[in-house]
Image: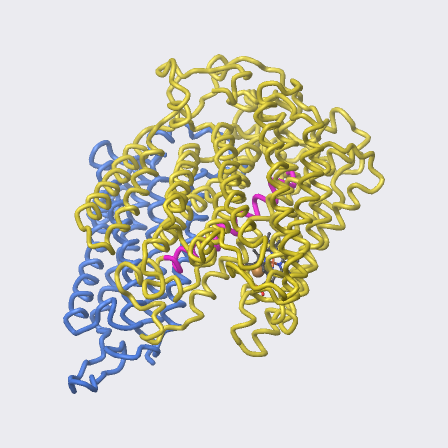
Amino acid sequence: MATVAASPTYTASATPQRSRLMSWLTTTDHKVIGTLYLHTSLFFFVLGGLEALLIRWQLMRPNSVVLTADQYNQLFTMHGTTMVFLAIMPLSAAFFNYLIPLQIGARDVAFPRLNAFSYWIFLLGGVFITLPIFFWVAPDGGWFGYAPLSGRTYSPGPNMDFWVLGLQILGISSLAASFNFATTIINMRAPGMNLMRMPMFTWMSFVTQFLIILSFPVITIALVFLQFDRFFGTTFYQISAGADPLLWQHLFWIFGHPEVYILILPAFGLVSEVLPTNSRKPLFGYPVMAYSGILIGFLGFGVWAHHMFAVGMGPIADTVFGLTTMLIAIPTGVKIFNWIFTMWGGSIRFTAAMKFAIALIAMFVIGGISGITHASPPSDLQQTDTYYIVAHFHYVLFGGAILGIFAGIYHYFPKMYGRTMNETLGTWHFWLNFIAMNLTFFPMHFAGMLGMPRRIYTYDAGQGWELFNMMSTMGAFLLAPATLIFIYNFFRSKKHGEPCGPNPWDAPTLEWSIPSPPPEYNFAKIPMVTSRYPLWDLTHPERTAEIPHTQTGWTEATQQTGEHDMAPMHIETETRTAKELGIPMPSSTIKPFFVALGIVLMFSGLLFLPKGMKVPAFALMFGGTAMWVGYLYAWLTTPLEDHH
Amino acid sequence: MSASADAAHGHHYTTTGLDNRKIAIWAFIGSECMLFASLISTYLIYKGKSLVGPFPHTPWTDPSSGKVFPAILNIPVTSASTFVLLMSSLAMVLALSAVENRGKPLPPGAGAWDKALTSSKLWLWMTCLLGAGFLAFQAYEFTSFVHEGLTIRRNLFGSSFFTLTGFHGAHVTAGVIWLGSLLAIDYKRGLQPSDALAVDLAALYWHFVDVVWIAIFTLLYLIPG
Ligand code: HEM
Ligand SMILES: [Cu+2]
């Protein structure tokens, strides 16, 4: 595999040589799965970007006819759905996969095969929900799919079927992954790494897993209702049967608001790694950073109805949700200040990653402030469903999540591939991207304040919107070359980037103590951790002098296992293979792939039901079920590891 | 993940000292709580909102035909099925304890009952059969409701009732299959104390499904209105 070519290669005895495709299909290595996630979600990011370009092309001028209204609906729906579920979430998952085990000193995730399953069902679900756009039968009810609009009565075609079933499939992926990562973080930390020593990325990921665990079942049920309404004629969202038109909205946003934190917290975690490293100072107020993450997670479940101020919930509900929404800005603001104080007085190194991280702080502040302006119901009534909202969520999602993820990619690329990305191209990418995103999204505030609604496929001239729309479209088309530079840099650097050692940025946490790229077992000897910045303790003790150091956890650990597998904190130089070292590794297997495939086939069968095509419907449903049940059984009855 | 695979690797260091699967099942159960909470809330929100009958606790006369539909829920029968499900939890506890204590010598003077307590097969069978018994009650309940005119498409009550209790029934079914697989292993090679964790996981799931039923029984059946 190219991704680990430079690491000492280890081949399971029973499986001497496999093709590259086969090695992907059967991998259980969290690092390979992480890079698979990374490439797949970058692909979807580009696809979602192309959809956005078509949208902007249509909106560039009043009354233009580039797209029909119907095509426009499909494009904005798929743009939102793709960016949320197929780009940002799995980009975060790429980092969960790659980094969490490395940051906590583990050899893999808790359930390596479940991890492979999560990836495959994400990929297949992504293909499932994406394919229809190439035939103009894509979902067209918006990324939040409001019922009853998305019910069979108002959306009779197959379009929303793809959306309902596709999101159901993708939900399985996120949930399976969240159980896995939560368990990994709770239970697989190196000895001495107590919660208050976890790297901040792992902390924010930890909070994110709980948000997924608790919020995804809610949308699962909302989707089950919609699915039953559409396929089996139930009445959950049928107003004529007395249904509550707000049921979907409540269920969706109880998931939907935690979801926006699921999108942003991993990016917050990434910049919390990039900023201290490149300021050559510990993270300012580490405990408060962790607590504010937890608080954001908690409060995130109590603000959902701020998306529904316009439906007339009454003064009490409006007040309560307005207040909770304003409250949640406090822990968010705390993070902003802590990042700034982290840089304060540091000796800053402006790597590409650092530029993106600093830009995130600035851009997120803009998005956060516009958020607070619609936390107040009367003011939101002016803003809701206008381009002002579109400006808000693009400042937090593009200016927050995406910039953070770019920072993470530049920062962690050397760990993944043993080479750094080109910094000059990175700088070009940064500035173009930065200018373009502001050109795209800042004018939307004005268009929105002048009353331009969201989700309209065209508009008349003379309402004062022309200039702002033209600017937004120019910005969007400038984002394209910026992204191209990034993609070029990414793929070129894999082969021709400057080779780097284990720790090119002189960073403080465990993942930098092992070779780049890491050997498949990650840590030949599990390090014993005595402080928050174990590597700086070795290389720059002056930087961590004020951080608490203790030896707790060692004795318990050595008692549990015998000392042979562990060693005091060190820089790893081992190059032998897992086999030579006698480290048991999970064996590769194709079963998780087939379980995922079976589930997707089973869901696909439903697509044929409304057309009355019973034979393919039941063939797919029963065939798919048989497939996933059979492979799941085989999976559960096969040991995880080869016996050495 | 199989029992045999794990026995070989029981010595992996973990932060909490617990097995990974034990942590994961709690995370899973946490998630399931939200799943059932959404289903139950929807049922409660739609209580009394159906435009046509049949209704759960009150009779309904069809204005067009004059036909009278009695109150649908049959509390005595469901009380019996609830009892059956609760007893299955007891059997589950005894099955787990039998596996954990396998191989320990019986105290002198142990009677037939003490002997019976050591049989994991017996108690796994009991759990499965009681679970299946609950499902039989549910099948009976569903068919009689349909005969009385309540289908999943009929009204909001039908939609939310069948979806909620159907989801629960599907969970019980999954549990019976899970326990059945443990039983198969027990017949094949005998469950050992080293398999206790595998049984414990199934037990946790099983008790959770029971607890959910108690919530459903209380909120749907016992509270009228
Ligand atoms: C300071 C914190 C924040 C506050 C006070 C806030 C407030 C709000 C409010 C009140 C709305 C509803 C506006 C309306 O529809 O009328 C909204 C929409 C939205 N927010 Fe935020 N927000 C905050 C942070 C975030 C973050 C961090 C994200 C994501 C990373 C985010 C993503 C979104 C999205 C996607 C929408 C639009 C959803 C839609 O209608 O499609 N927000 N925000
Ligand atoms: Cu929100």
Q: Is residue A502 left or right of residue A5?
A: right
Q: Is residue A531 visible?
A: no
Q: Quadrant of residue B52?
A: bottom left
**Residue A305: x percent and y percent?**
54, 67
In-front residue for pair B169/A374: A374
Residue at the image point whose x is 27% and y is 54% from the top: B170
Chain A display color: yellow
The total of numbered circles placed on residues is: 0
Residue A270, relative to residue B61: is it above or below?
Answer: above
Q: How is this picture coloured?
A: by chain
In this picture, is A225 found above or below B219? above
**A412 with respect to A341 (left or right):** left
In magenta stretch: residue B134: no
Residue A421 to residue B197: above or below: above
Q: Which chain is blue?
A: B
Q: Position of residue A421 (x, y in %)?
A: 65, 26
Where is residue A201 shown, x and y percent of the image? 62, 40
Magenta stretch encompasses residue A209: yes
Residue at the image point whose x is 23% and y is 54% from the top? A611
Q: Is residue B185 above or below residue A250?
A: above
In the picture, residue A442 is in which quadrant?
Answer: bottom right
Which region of the structure is painted magenta? Answer: A199-223
Quadrant of image for the C terminus of chain A:
top left
Q: Which residue does the image show at 61% across and 40% down from the upper left?
A: A405
Nearest to the observer: residue B178 or residue B128? B178
SS majority, magenta: helix
Percent position of residue B15, x then y: 54, 37
Quadrant in which residue B180 is drawn:
top left
* Any part of residue A588 in sight: yes
Q: Nearer the viewer, residue B183 or A58?
A: A58
Quadrant of ligand 1: it is: bottom right
